[in-house]
Amino acid sequence: MKPRDWIVSKQNLNQLMIYLEELIKEGKTPQVTIKEKVSGDKRSVEANKFLWGRLYKSISQFTGYLPMEVHLLCGHLFLSEQKTINGVQVPYVRSTTDLTVEEFTFYIQNIESYFAQLGWSIEQG
């Protein structure tokens, strides 16, 4: 079984319990590791403002696409992976909110490099 990270909250605690019960009913033995979430694991508010208020906005002006369309395009370009559902590989795009600070930095660098090759510069925006 592929490991799955689960950030527990009051809102999803019941879903976690259901998920674990289903695994046990299937004869599987889940192994649970609990650690406290560190706030530094996710990007800062300033980084999010840069992504949406500067980077996506600048690329939006360059391409003519809305910032949300730029966000979706970049997700497909740089955050796509494959998941298996019932033995079938299906495309999946990770959410930027799930990225660590390191992954988020790499994501930004990929975007800047990709669009720079198309003639874009952040100074234009």
Image (cartoon, grey):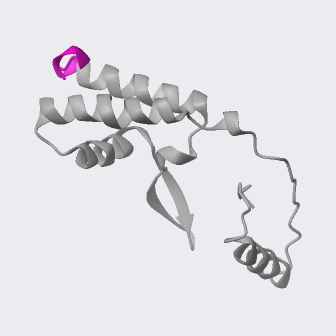
* Labels in figure, total: 0
Residue visible at 57% across and 69% down in the picture: 87
The quadrant where residue 66 appears: top left
Residue visible at 75% across and 39% down in the picture: 38
Q: Is residue 49 left or right of residue 37?
A: left
Q: Which is nearer the eye, 123 or 69?
A: 123
How far across and down, in percent of the image, does residue 83 sit?
53, 59
Q: Is residue 2 left or right of residue 46?
A: right
Residue visible at 72% across and 64% down in the picture: 9
Residue visible at 39% across and 26% down in the picture: 110
Q: Is residue 48 left or right of residue 5?
A: left
View extreme (bottom): residue: 25
- Vertical placement of 35 versus 103: above or below? below
How far across and down, in percent of the image, does residue 88 sit?
50, 67
- Vertical placement of 21 versus 48: above or below? below
The quadrant where residue 84 appears: bottom right
How far across and down, in percent of the image, does residue 10 sit?
73, 69
View extreme (left): residue: 64
Query: Where, quadrant-wise, is the C terminus in this rendering?
Result: top left
Which span is picked out in magenta?
117-125
Is 118 within the magenta? Answer: yes
- Vertical placement of 25 versus 82: above or below? below
Query: Where, quadrant-wise, is the N terminus in this rendering?
Result: bottom right
